[in-house]
Image: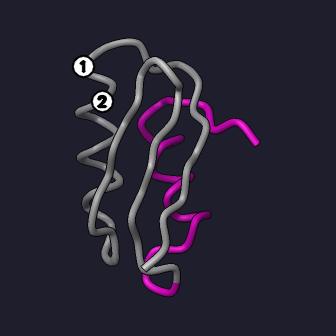
Amino acid sequence: MSKTIIKVEGMSCEHCVKAITNAVGAVEGVSGVSVDLAAGTVAVDHDPEKAPVDKLKFEIEDQGYDVVE
């Protein structure tokens, strides 16, 4: 398992937290998602082979948020 921290812009409320948590959490290989609104980060515990970082970023962007490199 790996833990990846992804910087995200555009999150402002609990709806944002739920949307990202549900979308990323539904990816096979993800065992945990923690969204920090104040820091603008999403921490994901995942199997990098089943749930690569690019897939996680895609799911966040698919919800309408911007991943910051």
Distance of label 1 from label 2 (alpha carbons): 5 Å
> Which residue, as the protein is rendered here, is positioned at the far top?
12
Q: Which residue is drawn at 31% across and 49% down?
A: 23
Circle 1: is it few (<14), some (14-19), or many (20+) Cα within 10 Å? few
> Which residue, as the protein is rendered here, is positioned at the far bottom?
49
The amino acid marked with disc number 2 is Val
Do the numbered discs 1 and 2 sit on residues whose CB atoms are within 8 Å? Answer: yes
Q: What element carries label 1?
A: helix
Whether residue 65 appears in magenta in the rendering, the answer is: yes
Q: Which residue is drawn at 42% across and 36% down?
A: 63
Quarter of the picture containing the C terminus is top right
Q: Which residue is drawn at 25% across and 61% down?
A: 26
Residue carrying label 1: 14
Dividing the picture into quadrants, the one containing residue 66 is top right
Q: What element carries label 2?
A: helix
Q: Residue 39 location in percent, x, y?
A: 52, 24
Q: Residue 37 location in percent, x, y?
A: 42, 22
Q: How many labels does the image show?
A: 2
The amino acid marked with disc number 1 is Glu
Residue toward you, 33 or 23: 33
Circle 2: is it few (<14), some (14-19), or many (20+) Cα within 10 Å? some
Image position of 29 (left or right of 54)? left
Residue carrying label 2: 17
Q: Residue 61 location in percent, x, y?
A: 53, 41
Q: Residue 68 location in percent, x, y?
A: 70, 36
Image: 33 above or below 30: above
Magenta segment: 49-69
Whether residue 61 appears in magenta in the rendering, the answer is: yes
Image: 36 above or below 21: above
